[in-house]
Each structure stands twice: as C-alpha cells, then as structure tokens.
Image: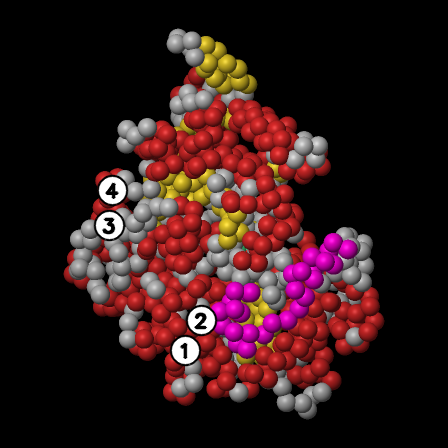
Amino acid sequence: MFDKRLDKKKFKEEVESNLKLLYRHTIAEASQQELFQAVSYAVKEVIMDDWISTQKAVKEQGAKTVVYLSMEFLIGRALGNNLINMNSYRQVEDCLAEMGIDLNALENQEPDPALGNGGLGRLAACFLESLTTLGYPAYGCGIRYRYGMFKQKIENGYQREVPDDWLKDGYPFELRRPDFTQEVRFGGTIHFEKDANGDDCFIQENYQSVKAVPYEIPIVGYGNHMVNSLCIWDAEPIVNFNLDSFDSGNYHKAVEQENIAKNIVEVLYPNDNHIAGKELRLKQQYFFISASLQSALQKFKKTGASIFTLPDKVVFQMNDTHPTVAVAELMRLLLDQEHLSWEEAWGITTKCVAYTNHTIMSEALEKWPIDLFERLLPRVYQIVQEIDRRFVAEVRSRYPGNEEKVARMAILYDKQVRMAHLAIVASFSVNGVAALHTEILKNQELKDFYEMMPDKFNNKTNGVTQRRFLMHANPWLSDWITLELKTTEWATNLDLLAGLKALVDNPAAQSDFIEIKKQNKIRLAQYIKEHNGIEVDPESLFDIQVKRLHEYKRQLLNILHVIYLYNQIKENPEQEVQKRTFIFGAKASAGYIRAKEIIKLITSVAEVVNNDASIDGKIKVVFIEDYKVSNAEIIFSAADLSEQISTASKEASGTGNMKFMMNGGVTIGTMDGANVEIVEAVGAENAFIFGLSSEEVIQYENHGGYNPQDIYNSDPKLRQVIDQLVDGTFAGGDREMFRNIYDSLLTNKSGRADQYFILKDFDSYRQAQAAAVAAYKDKSAWARMAMMNTACSGKFSSDRTIEEYVRDIWHSQKIQVEGK
Ligand code: GL4
C-alpha cells in the first residue's frame, strides 16, 4: 500500500526542490550521488513525521525503553530498506522511473555505513529493526566512527585495506542533536571534599574532557509508522578551535583538544572475535558509555519520577563485554550525582543491566591492565574495586576455603580487570546466542558463575530480519511467497513460511523455485563479472562461504577441499563431474597474518584453477572483494550450498547461516552454533552435516589436541593436497609462500598442530560434499530440499528473538503510534 503521505506529485516536487536547495541543480544536471541525496531527503521528510509522533508517544505512554549498548551497529544501506518498511518501495521506484531515475542505481550510490565488523554488529542492527517493527520503544547507543570497517581491495591476491570514508558526501539520514551534548572526562586525580551541606563530594582535577555530540539515525518499523533511533556519539573538543587562540597563545592547547577528540572516534577497530587491548579502545568504550548513560539519566529525570523507579523505565542491554564499563559508570552517576548509598545504587544498577555473551574464543575475552584502567578512569576504577571487594567476600562466604575459586572468579586478578566477570556480577541476566553456545557457557566457560547464580543464565538464539534479508535482498522470492501464501503477513510473522511445506512436492512450485534461484544466480554472476572480471556459469552449483576470515571458521578446510577436487578432475579428465562455483567473501583483521595468508591461498588457487584449460571450467573459484552488507544481500539469495563449517564449539551462533536458509540455501555444516537448531528445524535429511561434535572437540582440547600426522600419513589424497601447499603448485613455484599454513596444520611450531581440526574433519567434509553433489543431480529433490529450508526458517526471524528478550529479560511494553 502506498503511504498516503508519499503523494507522487509532492514527492517529485520535493526531490526537485532538494536538488535545488542542496546543489543548485536540476534533475538533468544532477549527478547520481546528488540524486541519491535529494531522494533520501525526500524520504526522510516523510519519516520525520512518524519519528516525531513515535517520540511523543514514547513520552506520553511512559513505557519501559530498551537501550541497546553496542560498540557496533552494522546497519547497511538505509534508502531501500526504509522504503520497504514504509511499504513504498515499488511506488517510489515507479515514481522515480517516471522522472527518468533508476532507484536501484541510486541505492548503489549510498555508502554502506559499516560501523561494525560482522555478525555481532549486524545482529545489533537487526535487533533495532525488529524492536521497532514489533512496536517496542527502544534505541541503540554507539559511536559515530569517522571511518568504519575498512574497504577491502584485492591486489595481486593479497588483501589491502582502504579507509572507509563513509561521510565524505554527507549522510542524509542522520540528524545532529547538539542540544543533547554531554561532557566526558578522562584521567586526572580524584579526592573527596565536604560540600556546603557536609556531604561527601567527589572532586576530579587535571582531567581531559571531550564533548560528546549525538547524531540520530531513524530506524523505521515495518508498516507501523513507528520510528526508533540509533544514537551515535561524535567527539568534539570542549575548547572550540578558534582564531582567538592564536592571540591568547592557546593555540597549542586548542590543537591538542581537537586531536584528543578527533582520535577517539576516528576509526572502528577492525577485529572480530579478537581484542587488540589498546588504550584508545578503552577510551572509545568509556566515551560512548558515559555519554549514553548521562543522557539516559537526564531523560529519565525530566519525567520527575523517583530514581528508584529507573529499573521500571529502562533496561540497558550490553552487547558483549565492550560496553561493560556501563556497570561502574551507572554506579558512579548514582553515587556521585544522585548521592545514593552504595546499597541503593547497586540495587538499581543490578536491576537495569543485562549482558549478552557472543563468543567463547579466549582471544576475544576483554581484560584491561589495571594501571591503564585506573589512570584513564580513576573514579570508575575505585568503584570497580569496591564491586570486586564485595563480590569476592560473597564468593568466600559461599565457598569457604576455596581460594582457587576466588582466583577464577574475581573481577580484579593478575593486575587485570576482567570485563566479563564485571558484566556477569552486575547483570540480572546473562545470555548466550544459540542453545549450544549457552550450554557451553554454563558447563564450561562460565561454569563457576552458573553454579553460583544459575537463575541469571538464559539462551536467546539469534535471528535476522526478513525485511532486509528476504524482502529487500530477494524480491523475486518474496513476490512468489506472497503469491503462494496469498498474504504479505509473513513480513511480520515468519512462521507463516511453514505454509510453503504444502508445496515442496508440487512440480510447478518446484520449477518456480528453481527459476527464481536461477535469476538470483544470474544477478550474482553479473556482479562477479563486473567486480572480478570472472565469468561464472549460473547453471553450476553455487557453493558459498561468506563471513569474516578466521581460522575457526575454516575457510582453509573449504579451499583444501577445492584443491582436492581439482586434483581429482585432473587425474580423471574423462569423468563426468558436477560443474561447481566456489565463492568466498571475507575480510581479515588488518593485523591477522594467518587470515591474510589464507586469503592469498584462496586467490592463488582461484588463479590456477580458473586458468587451467584442461579442466574445462568444471570448477571455478571466486573471491568476492569487499564483502559487506550491500553485496551480502545479492550473495545470500544466489546460494545453492551454504558453507557453515566452523570447528564445533567455536561459532557462538552464526547468522549468515540463517540468511542463506531463508533464501533456500542448503547448509553444509558442522553441529555448531545455530546450525544445530537449523538442522533441528529443517530435518537432517535437508542439510549436509559432518565433522566432530563440540563434545569431541572439547574432549580433545582438554587432552592436548590430537596428532594430525596420523591422518596425513594414512590419507594419500589429502597428503597430496597438503604437500601442494609447499611444492609451489599454487605459488608460481614458490615453496615458502604457504609454509606457515602448512606448518600450522602439521607441527606445533606456533601453538597446537591443527588447532582447528581441519585434517581431522577433512574426510567427513569430503563425504558431505560428495553427498551434496549427488543430491544436486536430482533437480526436483534438490528443489524440495531448498524449499524446505525456506519453509522451516520461521524460527530464525529476529522478531522471534526480540519477543523472547522482551518476555524473559526486558519486560517492556509495546506502544501505539498514530500513523497519519
Ligand atoms: C559473534 C559470533 O562470532 C557469531 O557466531 C554470532 O552469530 C555473533 C552474534 O551473536 O557474534 N561474536 C563475535 S565477537 N563476533 C560475532 O560475530
């Protein structure tokens, strides 16, 4: 239904007037970027009314607000999605076409706001969208990084990082809100003095401070006129850089302040599942947390309610440990500004904060050196000390004489602040992100805490928004679903997809489904041709692995298997084989050398395989440059096989697995993360499962690993593949290029040999691959399988996830917004 306010004539006039106002241009004179800006402002104009009425309704109805605290929000492009959620995509497309403007081309002008690394940041974005679609008052708090996730260029097969200057043309959807500026203080010294009333008053001196200025981005709900906000903080110097400084000799000071402020929000740390532990990162954390909490308290106090009712009105969800300093900052505000007693402040804080754990990777565990923490945040550190002192006393009284337990559980230990412990101690809820992950937290990683406080622990299996990853990403499939189900209601009730089960054996429906998949494969093939210059055959099986590059995600297992296939094809040139295209997309953290070596291996194998005329194009390998939210939408819809092959126990959940599933991609994967629940939903016969179980992996790990040499010696075909890493086959004769990868698999030069069980799982993966290819031969059986995946994906909507958070953790209420 066309949004009434999006009157065609008015919309056209608006676009023209925006062009004139912004650029002094007419449509004929405008560049595509200028048109994108003008159209976006016209759309924002409509959003604005709903934004205003939503904020009014939130105030009036006084419902409990969810504040999602996150260092990352990987929101992706907004124009297309806002139009989808306003139910106006097709109408605006037509309207623009009448003006000679191609909406799709304009969408491609939008920078991809990449304020996140991968799954964790994208989840935060899906959550805000679902919260809004479901009608809950909520907002996200994060950082307005000047440079987001770097852009990836592949040069000579290697990754090169290019800064992501996403703000260079101006971002039309954001709104600067200088009225809500906060001051954030770092460092200095602290002491107490008595104030005029004789109360203890806390004094901080010689500190550095910066101004935190919020920008708001509208989060548009689907078809409900509700608009929540993502609030991202920019840092500005307190002393404005002005010409007077020259005269007063303050020039240096002014420049210094400017630099301190600029530095804080300069760049997103490009690490996923890994902590760099840099001082600037702690500054970023405190900066956005202090600003967010000060601002939330101010908003609350304006209502005139007693501070003791804060937990009835707001809940702070901490997205991993990155925002955990919020625990101590909230205490600080309640103690020093509201003058509450420790017990009162702790009572409120522990009813307001909840924590989500997103990983068990040990290198991702945040621990800050105490001396750094204390120097940067002297008052906050005092508070953490007191929280620790009280908690340790509690552990001692609960487990008398068990000093080992105390050492394992303390917040301050070995000259470090353990952020996860602080988060767990203060939070009223601790959740994992998939059933298996939560069990591992309870029984392994966080066992001591689970035993002491079992009621806090709960699971919330991740989900993704079908508005972006189905409706926007796959319009052909979306239209077909609507046609078959005779309703668009699946847009807000994804369980309705189960209705498609009735069609999986229907030949006409199967051929529709196959045809839609083919169209999506053609679209991706065009993208690959344009961006990689490689021709791929849309009739071939598209086998896709897109996600961050990490050893535990095992892109290496995938490419080793490609090498194995290549060898087999070369040895048996006459044998009929299924034509396949192996597609990879992955960014490696800038400092993660092994990950970068694996990218080079993939691109090198691609080079050899794609240019070997003797295999007649039977397999092709493509590494898609710069994997990001916008091209992800094209990629998910085109997959036949979805590679979810992490070492069991390591992938907390995964969310790409869900995006593939919705779009009819069939999983080849291990029993890890949410794969377990995907298989449960779709049936083991509609997925290809292989490899060690998480229990087996954990068993091996607890006993020092296993010996990959045994496998290397007993499997000649696998040995050939491994040897090819160091015989120059894929390195133009260079025997050293992939030596480190080779060593990591066979020796324990740097850590345990084959730490991620690649050799151990290879044979089982090879069999699963063979089974998948055999199944693909039967087009009808494959279509059935793919359709079953879409039909059973209802559970993996982030709407379901959010309803569970609301039911078990947040207890917030929906609000009504009047759509005009
Ligand atoms: C992650 C997990 O690695 C990933 O499995 C999960 O789906 C995601 C969202 O919960 O969180 N944790 C970190 S750290 N980065 C992720 O993507």
The amino acid type, in three-letter code, at marker 4 is Gln
Q: Secondary structure at mark 4?
A: helix
Instruction: State yes or no: residue 685 in magenta.
Output: yes
How far is the residue under mark 2 from the one under mark 1? 8 Å
**Residue 367: which quarter of the image?**
top right
Q: Look at mark 1 in the image and give the residue it sits on.
A: 501
The residue lying at 76 percent from left, 73 percent from top is: 718
Asked whether the beta carbons under mark 4 and mark 1 sit within 8 Å of each other, the answer is no
Q: Residues within 10 Å of mark 2 (few under 14, many from 20)?
A: many
| Any part of residue 805 in sight | yes
Measured along the vertical axis of the image, is residue 426 above or below residue 546? above
For the point 51% across and 22% down, which residue is it?
Answer: 207
The residue indicated by pointer 2 is 792
Kindly tell me whether residue 263 is visible in this rendering.
no
Q: What's the CA distance linking mark 4 and mark 3?
A: 8 Å
Q: Which residue is mark 3?
A: 816
Percent coordinates x, y for residue 537 in the rendering:
52, 80
Q: Which quadrant is the N terminus positioned in?
A: bottom left
Q: Earlier in the sequence, mark 4 or mark 1?
A: 4
**CB under 8 Å between discs 2 and 1:** yes
Q: Which residues are magenta?
A: 675-703
What main secondary structure does the magenta stretch of the protein show? helix
